[in-house]
């Protein structure tokens, strides 16, 4: 691995040939990158078949413990690759992946056997990383591509990862780790501390080996040598945005609303980027040691005629720009909203009036507003004190804004975006929801916002106040007017009251504001109304019916996305039962289909293992849906208020293709519990000592296997994000087929059933 990052990224992917001809991306009308062409066999191959294929290569290992450790590594490695593929984040035959493969071709043209053994894929992840798996699958993240300076740096990283595969570092490290943890061979008398240091030391040896032998592979090419120092800069500053540009303090200001100076820092925090961290217990040497090691080996080498770009500088710039555009979307999906806004801000410098980027900024502001309105801002916003560089100004500004201020700023940005793109429903829906939140949650009216510029209003109000104060005698009405005028003069110091001055000149905005206030008032009145006895009785009746019989949704067709199944044995160190899990996933899909048939419910199942090699469109739909539900589930778990989820431009084609807007995520997790002696067991033993006839039953209870199983169903209307059915079962038993059938059928029946109504 070229870098261990703060987050753990599951092992990843494959890219296939043939490569398509290069086509320049239109960034002015950017759309998210997708896969294309034939789905690679690696994506569709069953887990059991992969394991059998890899296991067959271990036949010449005599030592039983070593063979067992290697088999366990294959099980684990293949499982996590499988899970990543099933996440939909792995791309194939995409422009970025195609370019990575071309660089790999150039890098390894002197070693065609190694090149034929490797498959490269790009992963939609903002993390700066690259990783090699046991089957020769090497993945590179979008986050890494976005940070690179040139093609030569990419070539060196691929060389490093290629050596990891060539020397079987992954599986050898796993075997050595098994020896160390279990005190085998030379580690027999090691203390716990000795074992930690031994594992760290062995892992660092492999990293240095990959660095050095990767350099040997790299030096066989005509790639530039001087740029290698920059590779370690990429690793050192991996936490930072792809560029460091001063944040324009006027970016969210309006012609009439300016932020107070206190909302900005006098000086941003200096970028340090530590490269000499303590690595005594780390799996990787620190950046400084690796940098110095490589620099010592190349300092006397000549760089004459060497190049930073061999395949294509144009293709490199195109691939890197795609990765940077993708970062905005990925940061938002990972709830790093400030990062997404700053990333889009950087790109808007080069691509002004770009709807993709402006929608990302709008969405970031919208979701930050949602969290701040519910008092959960810190859950999705890192403290500005921790941020280094120019982006700290943005983090500080967002932190300083109160909930009503942020809501107002977000609404202004959304309304201006809506004016530029009036036919975009997603923008309109978010704009409307921001207006609703401003009025409902903050109880504001148009009177809370000024319609005139600050200087003009202040001059006018001061003149009115002077006129009232100069009156010799004041009537009751004069006193009222004086008080209101004084309040207005004081209010003018509130900067946020000027945020909509320019928008109030737009009749559409004023009307939307009035309409939302009227709608909000009507909803309040409706809630305050007391139900009649008949209405109350009918309401209770419907609630009782639903409680007893469940829902009756009247749905004809449902699409099941990636049915999930995991089997765990808590008695073992490696608790996931990989083979059993993979087989159960397949049988669970069949169980769903069987019960849907009984319930007369039409279903499709989206799972790459069942795709034909030409199901490119299905794979991209599968990827989009999983990204969408991951983001929606996180937000749903956090927020109580409704949120605009679906961008109809993305979801409408999927709804049209499958003939339904009802999509289902369902799964099972079953665990065999450890039979460790616990307080509950102790209670039964003590009871048996008092009453001896209970002893046989006590022994049976303690010794029998104990299981826990959880089953969930999550049915969503993807046209509006509404959860139509959310059900979960948790029980102390095995995942018996009869139980699973009963739960699944019950849910399928609720989806299909229609409630009968009596004619009056």
Image: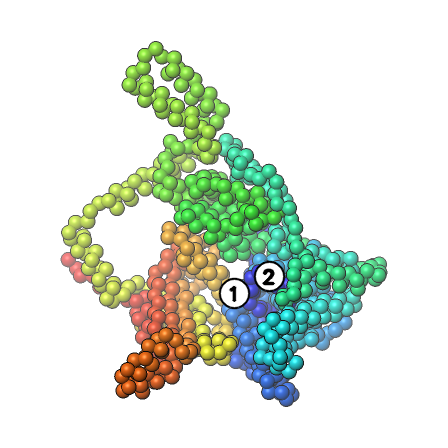
Query: Which residue appears at 46% of the width and 29% of the height?
Result: 493
Q: Position of residue 195 (x, y in %)?
A: 61, 73
Q: Position of residue 147 (x, y in %)?
A: 65, 55
Q: Earlier in the sequence, mark 2 or mark 1?
A: 2
Query: Which residue appears at 60% of the width and 75% of the height?
Result: 191
Q: CA distance from mark 2 to mark 1?
A: 21 Å
Task: Give the residue number, with chain letter if any, for mark 1.
Answer: 88
Left or right of 471 on screen, residue 566:
right
Left or right of 663 on screen, residue 75:
right
Q: Secondary structure at mark 1?
A: loop
Q: Quadrant of residue 452?
A: top left
> Can the viewer see residue 615 in this picture?
no
Task: Give the residue number, with chain letter if any, for mark 2.
Answer: 5
Query: Which residue appears at 65% of the width and 50% of the height?
Result: 272
Front-most of residues 200 and 395: 200
> Farthest top residue?
472
> Can the viewer see residue 111 in this picture?
yes
Left or right of 294 on screen, residue 677:
left
Q: Position of residue 459 (x, y in %)?
A: 46, 21
Q: Quadrant of the N terminus?
A: bottom right
> Farthest front residue?
690
Q: Secondary structure at mark 2?
A: loop
Q: Quadrant of residue 723?
A: bottom left
């Amino acid at each position: 691995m070229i870098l261990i990052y703060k987050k753990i990224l599951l092992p990843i992917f494959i890219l296939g040939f043939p490569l398509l001809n290069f086509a320049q991306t239109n960034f002015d009308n950017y759309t998210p990158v997708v896969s294309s062409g034939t789905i690679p066999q690696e994506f569709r191959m069953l887990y059991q078949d992969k394991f059998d294929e890899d296991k067959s290569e271990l036949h010449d290992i005599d030592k039983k413990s070593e063979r067992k450790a290697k088999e366990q590594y294959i099980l684990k490695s293949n499982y996590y690759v499988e899970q990543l593929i099933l996440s939909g984040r792995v791309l194939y035959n995409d422009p970025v992946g195609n370019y990575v493969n071309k660089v790999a071709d150039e890098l390894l043209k002197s070693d065609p056997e190694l090149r034929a053994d490797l498959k490269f894929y790009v992963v939609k992840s903002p993390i700066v990383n690259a990783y090699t798996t046991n089957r020769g699958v090497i993945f590179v993240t979008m986050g890494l591509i976005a940070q690179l300076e040139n093609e030569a740096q990419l070539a060196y990283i691929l060389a490093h990862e290629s050596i990891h595969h060539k020397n079987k570092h992954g599986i050898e490290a796993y075997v050595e780790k098994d020896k160390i943890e279990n005190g085998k061979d030379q580690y027999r008398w090691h203390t716990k501390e000795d074992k930690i240091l031994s594992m760290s030391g062995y892992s660092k040896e492999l990293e240095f080996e990959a660095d050095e032998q990767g350099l040997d592979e790299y030096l066989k090419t005509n790639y530039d040598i001087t740029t290698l120092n920059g590779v370690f800069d990429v690793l050192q500053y991996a936490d930072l945005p792809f560029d460091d540009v001063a944040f324009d303090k006027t970016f969210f200001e309006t012609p009439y609303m300016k932020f107070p100076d206190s909302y900005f820092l006098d000086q941003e925090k200096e970028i340090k980027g530590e490269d000499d961290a303590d690595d005594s217990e780390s799996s990787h040497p620190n950046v400084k040691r690796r940098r110095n090691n490589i620099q010592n080996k190349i300092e006397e080498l000549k760089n004459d005629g060497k190049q930073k770009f061999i395949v294509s500088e144009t293709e490199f710039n195109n691939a890197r720009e795609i990765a940077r555009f993708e970062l905005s979307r990925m940061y938002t999906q990972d709830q790093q909203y400030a990062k997404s806004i700053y990333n889009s801000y950087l790109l808007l410098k080069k691509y002004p009036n770009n709807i993709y980027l402006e929608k990302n900024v709008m969405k970031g502001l919208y979701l930050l507003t949602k969290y701040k309105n519910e008092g959960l801002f810190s859950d999705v916003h890192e403290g500005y004190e921790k941020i280094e560089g120019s982006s700290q100004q943005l983090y500080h500004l967002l932190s300083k804004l109160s909930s009503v201020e942020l809501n107002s700023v977000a609404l202004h940005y959304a309304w201006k975006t809506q004016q530029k793109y009036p036919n975009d429903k997603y923008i309109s829906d978010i704009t409307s929801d921001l207006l609703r939140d401003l009025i409902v949650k903050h109880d504001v009216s148009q009177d809370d916002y000024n319609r005139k510029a600050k200087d003009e209003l202040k001059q006018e109000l001061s003149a009115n106040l002077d006129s009232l104060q100069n009156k010799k005698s004041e009537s009751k009405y004069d006193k009222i007017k004086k008080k209101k005028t004084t309040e207005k003069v004081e209010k003018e110091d509130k900067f946020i009251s000027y945020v909509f001055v320019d928008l109030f000149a737009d009749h559409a905005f004023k009307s939307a504001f009035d309409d939302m206030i009227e709608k909000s008032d009507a909803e309040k009145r409706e809630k305050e109304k007391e139900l009649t006895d008949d209405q109350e009785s009918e309401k209770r009746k419907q609630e009782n019916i639903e409680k007893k019989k469940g829902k009756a949704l009247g749905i004809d067709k449902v699409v099941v996305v990636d049915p999930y199944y995991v089997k765990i044995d808590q008695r073992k160190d490696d608790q996931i039962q990989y083979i059993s899990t993979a087989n159960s996933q397949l049988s669970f899909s069949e169980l769903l289909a069987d019960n849907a048939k009984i319930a007369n419910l039409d279903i499709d199942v989206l799972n790459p293992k069942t795709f034909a090699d030409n199901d490119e469109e299905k794979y991209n739909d599968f990827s989009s849906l999983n990204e969408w539900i991951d983001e929606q589930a996180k937000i749903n778990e956090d927020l109580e208020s409704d949120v605009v989820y679906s961008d109809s431009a993305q979801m409408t084609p999927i709804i049209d293709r499958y003939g339904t807007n009802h999509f289902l995520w369902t799964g099972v997790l079953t665990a065999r519990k450890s039979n460790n002696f616990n307080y509950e067991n102790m209670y039964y033993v003590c009871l048996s000592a008092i009453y001896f006839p209970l002893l046989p039953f006590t022994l049976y209870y303690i010794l029998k296997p104990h299981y826990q199983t959880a089953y969930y169903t999550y049915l969503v209307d993807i046209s509006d994000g509404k959860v139509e059915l959310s059900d979960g079962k948790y029980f102390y038993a095995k995942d018996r087929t009869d139980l699973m059938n009963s739960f699944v059928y019950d849910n399928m029946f609720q989806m299909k059933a229609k409630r009968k109504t009596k004619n009056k």
